[in-house]
Amino acid sequence: MEISNQKRSRLIKRGFFLIAVLLLLPILFFVWKEMDLVALINGGVFLLFIIGFQFMGLNYVHYQSDGEVLQIRYYPIISFFGKEYSSIEFNKKRLFKAVVERSFLFHELHLEIKTREGIAEYPEVSLAALSSADIEAIRNDLSKMLPEKRQLGQ
């Protein structure tokens, strides 16, 4: 199975930049008109918008589980500190635990695998930019990979 939110990521990125420009234009206008207090208030709204987007952790996610290997590649859609491309790749037989859980308003994927030294936990992957159908498809696909004694968390 292969899931990618490339089209949705593009729409999110375009929407972000459109809203950012629409928030910056009034700031420039108020600075030009020397209405400093109103410009500062609009600047604060703009700053909250930027921080909010960073807090949401919207990621481009490419999930592929064809064959013996599970691959998850992801990176932030909007990042002001450089894109951190990340990848998770392992043999499906090593999957120990997979949990897709709702954290605050967004879904996150937590994976654990068996290694020679014990259980290794991968960093969580934000699924906030995926549709509900894609999240459910990932949840169902991972539940098929898990041994029957372990249930996929929700």
Image (cartoon, grey):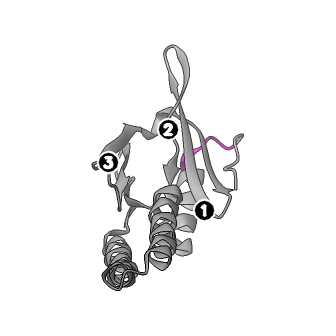
| Quadrant (top left/top right/bottom left/bottom right) for the C terminus | bottom right
State whether residue 126 is above or below residue 35. above
Question: Residue 119, labelled with which disc?
Answer: none
In this view, the residue in front, 119 or 129, is 129
Whether residue 6 sits left or right of residue 154 in the image: it is left
Residue type marked 1: Phe
Work out whether residue 29 or residue 82 is closer to the camera in this orientation and state it.
29
The answer to which of marks 2 and 3 sits earlier in the sequence is 3
Q: Residue at x 30, y 82 (%)?
A: 32
- Provide the secondary structure element on which disc 2 rests: loop
> Which mark is in front, 2 or 3?
3
Q: Secondary structure at mark 1?
A: strand
Q: Is residue 77 above or below residue 23?
A: above
Which residue is at 57% across, 53% downward? Answer: 108
**Residue type at the position of mark 2:** Pro
**Front position in the image: 57 or 69:** 57
Residue at mark 2 to residue at mark 3: CA–CA distance: 19 Å
| CB contact under 8 Å: marks 2 and 3 | no
Mark closer to the chain start, 1 or 2: 1
Residue 85 horizontal/vertical position (percent)? 29, 46
Q: Are marks 1 and 3 in contact (CB under 8 Å)?
A: no
SS assignment at label 3: loop
Q: Is residue 147 magenta?
A: yes
Which residue is the site of mark 1? 106
Neighbour class for label 3 at 10 Å: few (<14), some, many (≥20)?
Answer: few
Q: Which mark is residue 81?
A: 3
The boundaries of the magenta stretch are: 144-148
Most frequent secondary structure within the magenta stretch? loop
